[in-house]
Image (cartoon, helix red, strand yellow):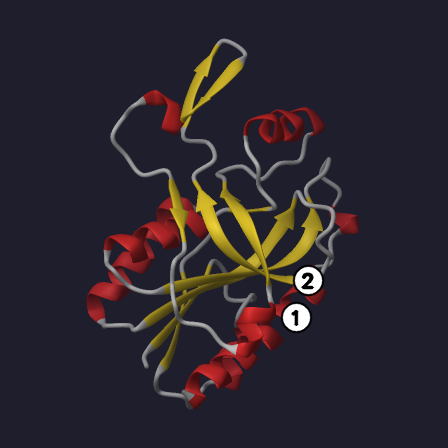
């Protein structure tokens, strides 16, 4: 099974790349941060080589305070949160606009491992601007239900679904989505736990 690990940045997967340096069936790509560059870089990559599974990994902010900092989650539903229109002070979500397009993705992949099965399954939102203002956070949550947010998840899902490639999205929680305060973030813990979890999953997949 050829597996492609997709992350936004190198530092999120540096440990994984070292661990699986000699595993010829496991490949890595860091796309850059954001929806557009992720969709472009991933599409360019899959045109060069066939992959049996794509795993999008990274850190995320949590709206859901029941999630723990450093906890690792599996995103089974993701959507482009900012796709829509303004109607004065109200926001019209894209599904209500009756326009042709792609908005959300429900992951129906059948590939799983013992470690993946134990991960908490959550709803993700993909945004261009991560939330850091109480008013915008409250406005967002009045429109949508989401447990976590990232800047790339739905883009990976879109490309994989369009190209019929099985995919997983696994993210660890680096912070809660609140008024921006990076002193409360724990990115090193999130990355450490993320890499440990992905290592287990890759080893389990190799056993099948």
The picture places residue 121, in percent across and down from the top left corner, at 57, 57
- Relative side of 25 to 133, left or right: left
Q: Is residue 138 above or below residue 173?
A: above
Q: Are marks 2 and 1 in contact (CB under 8 Å)?
A: yes
The picture places residue 165, in percent across and down from the top left corner, at 29, 64
Q: Badge 2, how many Cα within 10 Å: few under 14, some, many 20+?
A: some
- Looking at the rendered structure, the secondary structure element under dot 2 is loop
The picture places residue 2, in percent across and down from the top left corner, at 32, 79
Q: What residue did someone put label 1 on?
A: 193
Q: Is residue 150 above or below residue 197?
A: above
Q: Is residue 186 above or below residue 178?
A: below
Q: Residue at x 41, y 55 (%)?
A: 107
Q: Residue at x 68, y 30 (%)?
A: 133
Q: Residue furthest left?
A: 47
Q: Badge 1, how many Cα within 10 Å: few under 14, some, many 20+?
A: some
Q: What residue did someone put label 2 on?
A: 71
| Distance CA(mark 2)–CA(mark 1) | 7 Å
Q: Is residue 176 visible?
A: yes
Q: Quadrant of the N terminus?
A: bottom left
Q: Is residue 152 visible?
A: no
Q: Is residue 142 above or below residue 118?
A: above
Compare residues 108 and 178 and report the one nearer the observer.
108
């Amino acid at each position: 099974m050829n597996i492609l690990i997709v992350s936004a940045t190198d530092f999120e997967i540096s440990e994984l790349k070292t661990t699986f340096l000699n595993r010829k069936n496991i490949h890595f790509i860091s796309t850059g941060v954001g929806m557009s560059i992720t969709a472009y870089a991933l599409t360019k990559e899959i045109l060069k080589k066939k992959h049996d599974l794509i795993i999008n990994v990274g850190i995320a902010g949590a709206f859901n305070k029941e999630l723990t900092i450093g906890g690792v989650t599996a995103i089974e539903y993701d959507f482009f949160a900012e796709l829509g229109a303004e109607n004065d002070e109200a926001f019209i979500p894209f599904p209500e606009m009756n326009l042709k397009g792609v908005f959300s993705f429900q992951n129906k992949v059948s590939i799983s491992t013992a470690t993946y099965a134990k991960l908490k399954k959550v709803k993700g939102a993909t945004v261009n601007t991560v939330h850091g203002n109480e008013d915008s956070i409250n406005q967002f949550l009045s429109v949508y239900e989401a447990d976590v947010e990232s800047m790339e998840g739905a883009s990976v899902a879109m490309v994989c679904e369009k190209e019929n490639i099985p995919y997983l999205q696994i993210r660890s929680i680096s912070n809660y989505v609140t008024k921006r305060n990076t002193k409360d973030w724990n990115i090193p813990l999130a990355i450490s736990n993320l890499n440990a979890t992905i290592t287990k999953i890759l080893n389990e997949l190799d056993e099948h």
